[in-house]
Amino acid sequence: MATSQTRTVSVTIERGADEVYAFLAVPDNFPRWASGLCSAVTPDGDAWLADTPNGPMRVRFSPPNPYGVLDHRVYPSADVEIYVPLRVIANGDGAEVVFTLFRLDGMSDAQFDEDARWVARDLATLKALLEA
């Protein structure tokens, strides 16, 4: 398997890393800030059903852990899995939220740029929400 081009998008949040992680570890909170992922989520067995910009998709979130890992996997179809690495890292008294965006097969430069801009907007929304 060949490697993919990636972009790392991050935001500094003036809240403790534990607080930021606790908020992000609740899948029900994703619609409040992650418009690129979903406008709503509902439990669906051992996963979640997300209303995404591209229609309904299953999502599996990482289990709670002490390492700040919030990775999730999105399934646009039964045979396709999109891995989304997401981390919360302590940054002094605040937190750094780090999102790694993988370029998908067949994605144009313009689409990859737009995805990165969308992630940045979503992380800015998260920052505003948690710093309010």
Image: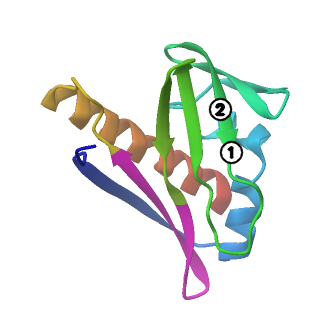
| Secondary structure found at label 1 | strand
State which region is magenta.
87-101
Q: Which is more toward the observer, 128 or 51? A: 51
Q: Is residue 7 above or below residue 32?
A: below
Mark 1 neighbour class, 10 Å CA radius: few under 14, some 14 to 19, many 20 or more: some
Residue at the image point whose x is 31% and y is 39% from the top: 117
Q: Quadrant of the N terminus?
A: top left
Q: Is residue 75 above or below residue 25?
A: above
Q: Main secondary structure of the magenta part?
A: strand
Q: Is residue 78 above or below residue 13?
A: above
Callout 1 amino acid: Phe
Q: Quadrant of the C terminus?
A: bottom right
Residue at the image point whose x is 41% and y is 61% from the top: 10
Image location of residue 63, percent across then percent down: 75, 55
- What residue sits right under mark 2 in the picture? 59
- What residue sits right under mark 1 in the picture? 61
| Quadrant hosting residue 28 | top right
